[in-house]
Image (tube, grey):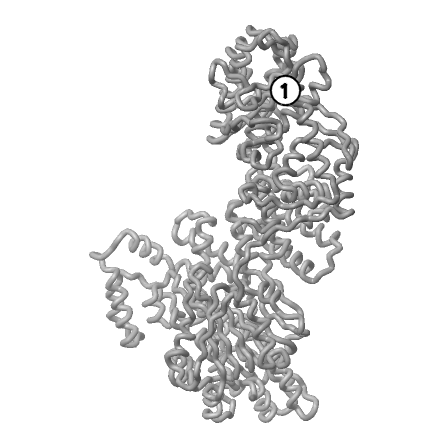
């Protein structure tokens, strides 16, 4: 079967010969030119002079001396015109989004050659309708219906605001055009209008051949007429006569092209037969778009689709599916051509730009004049930052204005481009594109065209990056084609797979958002939703016109960012096409979901080397490490064999349980260090004096908050939000409660605060140090006996039930009752007891939230029996802890994951085990 472009190529050679050097072939887009050129080369029986290939946009722009301003510059100048004509001091930040809408209306008005004075006429001047001879009866009927809504007795506040803006619309339009013209600039619609209204156009080519256009805008129609009258123009339309004959949108397009006879001398019945000939059409529903993408490999391997190469096309109605589709292409595909570009927003460069802006906005603490650690650390971990010179990052200062911010980002991208050893085209193109966009913004900011606050600038940069793509390089005329719907224009394929053909994706973006109401748009020939739907209808039917093998997939799930509705064009085929039997199939995952079960990790020589190097003889084996192993050996493996760090907290200035405990420990340490300045003996009077002086307690808590939460110097003034203030008051209350307990206990001695203790442990498999840090070590008189207490502060709300005996500390079922608290207290107490062989040592857990009783005693108990001397239990404890350490470092015992899923809920590594 011949393609449309093959017919065109044959006809051009027959009518214009082999010398096409003075011929310009005009397409709606660039892509089809490569295929037509290939057909011309194959069909010519001798060497030919190739024609020039241009797009319709190129044709207009080449015949104007003005330059189309970029979209940001257009909106900025439109904002100035808006203020000058309305007197409303609307900020550019508020104006920007609906300024884009207004700009689109002006562009559409010019491309359809509508009279701005008439379109934006004052709606209250209804008598102007009396002299409306220029309107057709149908237009008069439409306008009369619209204007009836704006009578004096039928006005609402919203209508009044609309009328107030509408009354200035034509003034804004003219001022905006004049403002751009003074700078030698314009917007696309105005440029097109200027070109077609000129009488002195000196066209560069003798002959213009227009190929594959459909729904013409008025500027295009008038340009075509001008060239037709001068006998310089020839037209090739690709009609699906079945579609044109029976489809309302088809009639619409035929009407637009009626003035331009089709040069293609193909019998209409032949084209009709292209559609009604035998073809296989399959509709497939699938629960997700990912399942649709995974079907690609199966589809390609069937029906010789792989072998047919460029005659096979995969069309994406949702171009966000591109990455998934590329990953699903089977290895047998040797050549692949992708016409949809890679989204810049999905590149590492885009994430870096976002981090830089976030650091300068959300990441900067105005009160403390510093950057928040979490966002700064996130930036420093970005893979590209290693290529940035230190002077661009340290010392880091907040940008004073938008220009400084954008210039700083441009400097960082320049440094990355110069120093990176990444030679991949994707990296280089992404950096170049990003730098170009930012540099353009910088020039607009410096020229005072772009005057917005930083939040609008951030939104604008995100919008620009989101709409920018990085083109793939390849040989378009070879290999399987992956493309969006628009790229299929003028191209024909034997095998077509259309993905995500849902309502909302095809037709895509057909809405009537505009300042010009629908009735006015229709009356004055502006673009309406009907136009947009007709265009997409044409694309859809033309795509499947010559294909013999069509498979169309859509999502039937309402949760996959859609309503689960097939496109209206699919429904139309089902209802109107009586020439083909459509097959209906459903795609499913094909397998039942099996939860991933984490597997044991054997202690290979490499794993053992990693663990032993971590716990070398001078290193410290802490109770935390032993507890991790007891909770889940695999968690121990991830932490100490793999060296994986736990993820950072999501917000660094939120006081979570960990930070709350750290602040309490730090503040209490400061308070008691001041008490110990006089003497290590704590007297009742000293504690009472401190309790009566709340300022000293508040100062200690504030210093602790500065250190643990904000990571700043204690001398800096704190600015706390509401939740932080509440936590501050709670911590102050806890400190005072601790002091009240000690007032009742005084006199007593504090041996040390936050002191490190350790001891050598030797087992069959390892010799290392074991120990950790004790919150407080004090010496009291209890029932006439002097004892040493090893105290661990606990700020949590849950106080565990007492364990029964030493063995319970190592029992798996005790973990849910915080046996880890006992393990730590016992271990530290045993080390201290060995250092003080003549004095009893008692382990204690001081739960500050449960210490309100007058006889509160933090001593650990077994059952109801307090442990006044750990020596009574140290032998059995030492045996059990040694056995556990032996188990950890025994190479014959694998790291087996826990079978208790409750322990997995708060595990930082649960995603590695695919546990949700």
Whether residue 218 is visible, yes or no, is no
- Of 188 and 457, the residue lying toward us: 457
- Of 499 and 789, the residue lying toward us: 789
Asked which secondary structure carries label 1, the reply is strand
Residue 759, percent from left and from top: 74, 25
- Of 280 and 836, the residue lying toward us: 836
Furthest residue in direction left, as rendered: 153
- Of 54 and 388, the residue lying toward us: 388
Q: In this view, does 394 lie above or below 505?
A: above
Q: In which quarter of the image is residue 339?
A: bottom right
Q: In which quarter of the image is the N terminus?
A: bottom right
Residue 30, percent from left and from top: 58, 74
| Direction from residue 111 to residue 896 in the image, left or right | right
Whether residue 755 is visible, yes or no, is yes
How many marks the image carries: the answer is 1
Tag 1 residue:
790
Residue 242, percent from left and from top: 42, 86
Q: Is residue 462 above or below residue 365?
A: below
Residue 251, percent from left and from top: 38, 82
Q: Quadrant of residue 124?
A: bottom left
Q: Residue at x 49, y 63 (%)?
A: 288
Q: In this view, does 178 lie above or below 639?
A: below
**Crowd class of label 1 (few under 14; some 14 to 19; many from 20; radius 10 Å):** many
Q: Which residue is drawn at 34% across and 58% down?
A: 166
């Amino acid at each position: 079967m011949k393609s449309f472009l093959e017919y065109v190529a044959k006809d051009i050679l027959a009518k214009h010969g082999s010398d096409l050097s003075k011929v310009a072939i005009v397409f709606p887009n660039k892509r089809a030119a490569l295929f037509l050129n290939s057909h011309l080369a194959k069909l010519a029986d001798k060497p030919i002079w190739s024609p020039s290939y241009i797009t319709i946009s190129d044709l207009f722009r080449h015949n104007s001396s003005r330059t189309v301003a970029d979209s940001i510059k257009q909106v900025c100048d439109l904002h100035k015109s808006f203020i000058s004509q309305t007197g409303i001091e609307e900020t550019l930040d508020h104006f920007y989004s609906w300024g884009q809408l207004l700009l689109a209306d002006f562009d559409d008005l010019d491309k359809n050659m509508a009279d701005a004075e008439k379109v934006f006429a004052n709606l209250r001047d209804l008598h102007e309708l009396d002299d409306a001879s220029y309107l057709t009866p149908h237009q008069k009927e439409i306008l009369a219906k619209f204007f009836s809504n704006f009578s004096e007795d039928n006005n609402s506040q919203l209508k009044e605001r609309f009328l107030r803006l509408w009354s200035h619309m034509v003034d804004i339009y003219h001022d905006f055009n004049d403002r751009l013209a003074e700078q030698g600039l314009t917007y696309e619609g105005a440029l097109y209008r200027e070109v077609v209204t000129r009488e002195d156009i000196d066209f560069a080519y003798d002959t213009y051949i227009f190929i594959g256009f459909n729904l013409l805008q008025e500027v295009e129609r008038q340009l075509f007429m001008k060239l037709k009258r001068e006998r310089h123009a020839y037209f090739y339309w690709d009609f699906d006569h079945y579609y044109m004959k029976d489809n309302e949108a088809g009639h619409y397009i035929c009407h637009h092209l009626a003035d331009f006879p089709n040069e293609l001398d193909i019998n209409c019945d032949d084209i009709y037969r292209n559609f009604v000939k035998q073809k296989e059409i399959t509709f497939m529903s699938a629960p997700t778009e990912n399942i649709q993408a995974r079907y690609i490999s199966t589809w390609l391997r069937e029906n010789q689709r792989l072998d047919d190469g460029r005659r096979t096309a995969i069309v994406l109605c949702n171009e966000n599916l591109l990455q998934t589709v590329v990953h699903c292409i089977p290895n047998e595909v040797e050549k692949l051509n992708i016409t949809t570009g890679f989204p810049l927003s999905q590149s590492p460069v885009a994430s870096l730009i976002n981090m830089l802006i976030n650091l300068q906005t959300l990441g900067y603490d105005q009160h403390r004049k510093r950057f928040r650690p979490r966002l700064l650390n996130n930036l420093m971990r970005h893979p590209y930052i290693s290529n940035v010179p230190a002077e661009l990052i340290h010392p880091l200062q907040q940008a004073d204005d938008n220009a400084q911010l954008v210039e700083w980002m441009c400097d960082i991208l320049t440094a990355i481009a110069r120093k990176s050893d990444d030679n991949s085209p994707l990296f280089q193109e992404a950096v170049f594109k990003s730098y170009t966009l930012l540099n353009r913004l910088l020039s607009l900011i410096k020229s005072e065209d772009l005057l917005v606050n930083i939040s609008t600038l951030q939104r604008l940069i995100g919008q620009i990056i989101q709409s920018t793509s990085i083109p793939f390089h390849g040989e378009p005329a070879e290999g399987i084609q992956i493309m969006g719907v628009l790229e299929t224009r003028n191209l024909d394929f034997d095998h077509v797979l259309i993905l995500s053909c849902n309502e909302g994706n095809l037709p895509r973006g057909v809405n009537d958002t505009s300042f010009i109401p629908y009735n006015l748009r229709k009356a004055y020939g502006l673009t309406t939703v009907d136009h947009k739907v007709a265009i997409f209808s044409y694309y859809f039917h033309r795509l499947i016109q010559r294909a013999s093998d069509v498979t169309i997939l859509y999502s039937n799930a309402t949760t996959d960012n859609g309503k689960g509705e097939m496109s209206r064009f699919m429904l139309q085929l089902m209802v109107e096409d009586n020439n083909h039997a459509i097959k209906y199939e459903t795609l499913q995952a094909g397998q039942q979901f099996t939860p991933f079960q984490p597997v044991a990790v054997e202690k290979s020589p490499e794993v053992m080397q990693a663990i032993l190097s971590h716990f070398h003889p001078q290193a410290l084996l802490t109770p935390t490490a032993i507890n991790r192993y007891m909770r889940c050996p695999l968690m121990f493996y991830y932490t100490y064999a793999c060296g994986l760090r736990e993820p950072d907290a999501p917000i660094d200035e939120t006081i979570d349980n960990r930070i709350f405990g750290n602040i309490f420990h730090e503040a209490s340490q400061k308070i008691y260090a001041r008490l110990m300045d006089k003497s290590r003996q704590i007297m009742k009077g000293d504690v009472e004096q401190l309790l009566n002086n709340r300022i000293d307690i508040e100062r200690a808590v504030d210093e602790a908050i500065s250190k643990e939460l904000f990571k700043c110097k204690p001398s800096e003034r704190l600015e706390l939000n509401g939740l932080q203030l509440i936590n501050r008051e709670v911590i102050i209350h806890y400190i005072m409660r601790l002091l009240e307990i000690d007032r009742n206990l005084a006199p007593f001695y504090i041996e040390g605060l936050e002191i490190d203790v350790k001891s050598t442990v030797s087992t069959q498999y390892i010799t290392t140090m074991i120990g950790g840090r004790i919150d407080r070590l004090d010496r009291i008189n209890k029932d006439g006996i002097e004892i040493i207490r090893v105290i661990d502060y606990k700020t949590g709300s849950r106080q565990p039930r007492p364990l029964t005996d030493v063995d319970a500390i190592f029992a798996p079922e005790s973990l849910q009752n915080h046996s880890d608290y006992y393990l730590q207290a016992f271990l530290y107490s045993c080390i201290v007891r060995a250092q003080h062989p003549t004095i009893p040592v008692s382990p204690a857990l001081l739960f500050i939230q449960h210490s309100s009783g007058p006889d509160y005693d933090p001593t650990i108990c077994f059952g109801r029996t307090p442990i006044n001397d750990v020596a009574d239990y140290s032998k059995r404890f030492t045996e059990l802890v040694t056995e556990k350490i032996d188990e950890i470092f025994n190479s014959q015992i694998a790291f087996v994951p826990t079978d208790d899923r409750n322990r997995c809920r708060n595990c930082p590594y649960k995603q590695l085990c695919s546990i949700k």
